[in-house]
Image (cartoon, rainbow, N blue to C red):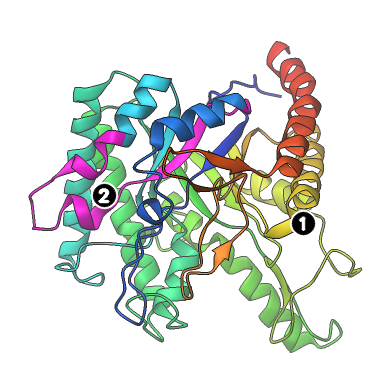
Amino acid sequence: MARYERLFESFFVGGFECSTHRLASGKRLDEIAFTQHDRFAREDYLRLHEQGIRTAREGLRWHLIESKPGTYDFRSLLPMLHAAQQTRTQIIWDLFHYGWPDWLDLFEPKFIDAFAKYARAFARLWREETDDILFICSVNEISFFSWAAGDSGVFNPFCHGRGNELKEQLVRSDIAACEALWDVDKRTRIAQIDPMINVLPLDPKNKKQAQEAESYRQSQYDAWDMLAGRMEPHLGGAEKYLDIIGGNYYVHNQWVLGGSFIDQENPRYRPFRDMVKELYARYQRPFFIAETGIENELRPKWLRYVCTEARAAFEDGVELQGICLYPIVNHPGWDDDRHCYNGLWDYPNERGEREIYQPLADELQNQRNCFQPLLASRENN
């Protein structure tokens, strides 16, 4: 087994919801502003430290940074960047979390060039501000977003039948951004993040259904395979673009094709550890659970399940780098602004104070205690 080297400042990571896409109503989401994280970033990072978390996932708001083509205004980002530096909080920055400037067409060839230039501009800003190694997720959830925006019409630009086209466009954009980032600083680390899913046939004995379900399940690997050059090599992929792999996992990530979700009580439910081990065996790259969470009183139980399964995968040789609680603060629902109780902390008051959900905090500390000896043992071997 290769020597285990920690990439992140803490095993547990706090993810701040940062979606910025436009809804069908025309409203643009800005979850960072809605949760006032941009206003209270320093306080939020210090809260993370109190819970033993020194690494966070964040997002740049491209539509604010480049509202005019080629003009980069980072004022919306700098308070968070400075707060992270002041508190010595390591950040994994999302360049694209479902949103882009209104002047840009997602499908046009110039999108790729614009995205690469935007990535380069941020890398240069980073170099001016700090000599720390930059951690990036260039395009969040290529496979999921391609389905949501290109096939199902759920996300902007609400298309149908263009999912594969969009997937290839985003892979090209991701590759171009990687090259731009590495051109500024070859030390930059890139996380390629997508959901991990399991899809089963309604009737396991029906060969056609089984083939369709397995084809759908295998599609979770499309973007990673494209980036690696294993699929559609004309896109320019290479193994180097799979630097770090992040897998997102939620309660609804397993379902019957054409049917309902599969819950943990169902005998057909696949243990999460097996999904992690399959993904790791396929790519053999540093891996972390990049998003996981659930709403309301199930939060501690869900974290316990995910951590138990992750620990089993880790003990079986997976190079597990961390687990990201996502979101780390409650946020408004995308479509209805409902108060989603899915974080460790709630909305802030005027002084920037957030009420903590103590049952989840207690479970987090329990899981930190469970992982610490395993991590120490792996590092010392």
Residue range corresponding to the magenta coloring: 51-79
Displayed quadrant of residue 108: bottom left
Secondary structure beneath dot 1 equals: helix
Q: Residue at (8%, 57%) from the top-left corner?
A: 69
Q: Name the quadrant containing residue 312.
A: top right
Residue 79: x and y in percent read 28, 34
Residue 68 located left or right of residue 174: left
Q: Which residue is mark 2?
A: 176
Q: Quadrant of the N terminus?
A: top right
> In terms of secondary structure, where does tag 2 sit?
helix
Determine whether 310 is above or below 50 in the image.
below
Query: Is 57 included in the stretch rendered in magenta?
Result: yes
Q: Earlier in the sequence, mark 1 or mark 2?
A: 2
- Label 1: how many Cα within 10 Å (few below 14, some 14–19, many 20+): few
Q: x, y percentage for residue 26?
A: 29, 78
Q: How far apart are the alpha carbons under marks 1 and 2? A: 40 Å
- Which label lies toward us, 1 or 2? 1
Residue 298 tag number? 1
Q: Residue at x 35, y 23 (%)?
A: 85
